[in-house]
Image: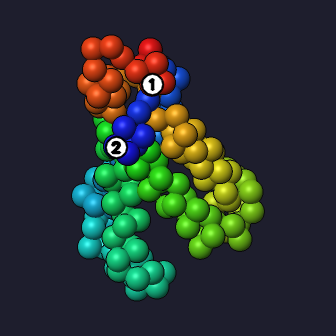
Amino acid sequence: MFHKVIGTRNEAHLAVLRLVLGVIFFAHGAQKTLGWFGGAGFTNTMGFFTDGMHIPAAFAFLAIMAEFLGGLGLILGFLTRIAAFGVFVNMNVAILMVHSPNGFFMNWSGAQKGEGIEYHLLVLAITVVLMLRGAGAWSIDRILTQRQAGPMGDAKFVR
């Protein structure tokens, strides 16, 4: 079972998707957890989610961790499918609870009330690819895949 979670091929394009998405989500998560990059920090973000948006504390915590730990997992390529799933759920909730009333487009001109869903749809597409194909090259998952394959290799995952 663990092999199915970490199994991946040595594909650079997956690594590019994983690394870019990981950096973006780690930065957003660091805003929410550590107050980095102009963020509010953990206590203020939890307060906003629970008091302002009326999200139960457990789900607010999971959303913050999906961004912070999910981003870190994607950068390292560690448990990539699980990290991508966390981001996938996070983006679906963001679309349903916040962004869908604002339409499709981002607020490039500042003319609409908030941000639309185009960014979120792009993230969903990337997470689906990572959940299906794994971390790709330059990842902890890849190293673990090679170790589990043994000296003879496993044609299904190792190339």
Secondary element at image label 2: helix
Q: Considering only vertical position in the picture, is 150 above or below 109?
A: above
Q: Name the residue under label 1.
A: 157
Q: Which amino acid does label 2 sit on?
A: Phe
Q: What residue type is labelled 1?
A: Phe
Rendered residue at 35%/77% (across/down): 58
User: Considering depth in this image, is 58 or 100 the residue closer to the camera?
Assistant: 58
The answer to which quarter of the image holds residue 77 is top left
Mark 2 vs mark 1, CA separation in Å:
13 Å
Residue 99 location in percent, x, y? 63, 66
Packing grade of label 1 (10 A; few <14, some 14-19, many >=20) is some
Q: Considering only vertical position in the picture, is 124 above or below 142?
A: below
Residue 77 can be seen in this image: no
The answer to which quarter of the image holds residue 8 is top left
Residue 34 can be seen in this image: yes
Q: Considering only vertical position in the picture, is 58 above or below 71?
A: below
Color style of the picture? rainbow
Rendered residue at 51%/60% (across/down): 89
Rendered residue at 59%/49% (across/down): 124
User: Considering depth in this image, is 89 or 111 the residue closer to the camera?
Assistant: 89
Residue 105 location in percent, x, y? 72, 53
Q: Mark 2 points at which residue?
A: 2
User: Considering depth in this image, is 103 or 37 the residue closer to the camera?
Assistant: 103
Name the quarter where the N terminus is drawn.
top left
Rendered residue at 46%/18% (across/down): 155
Name the quarter where the C terminus is drawn.
top left
Mark 2 vs 1, N-terminal side: 2
Residue 138 location in percent, x, y? 35, 23
Secondary element at image label 1: loop
Packing grade of label 2 (10 A; few <14, some 14-19, many >=20) is few
Residue that sits furthest to the front in the current view: 152
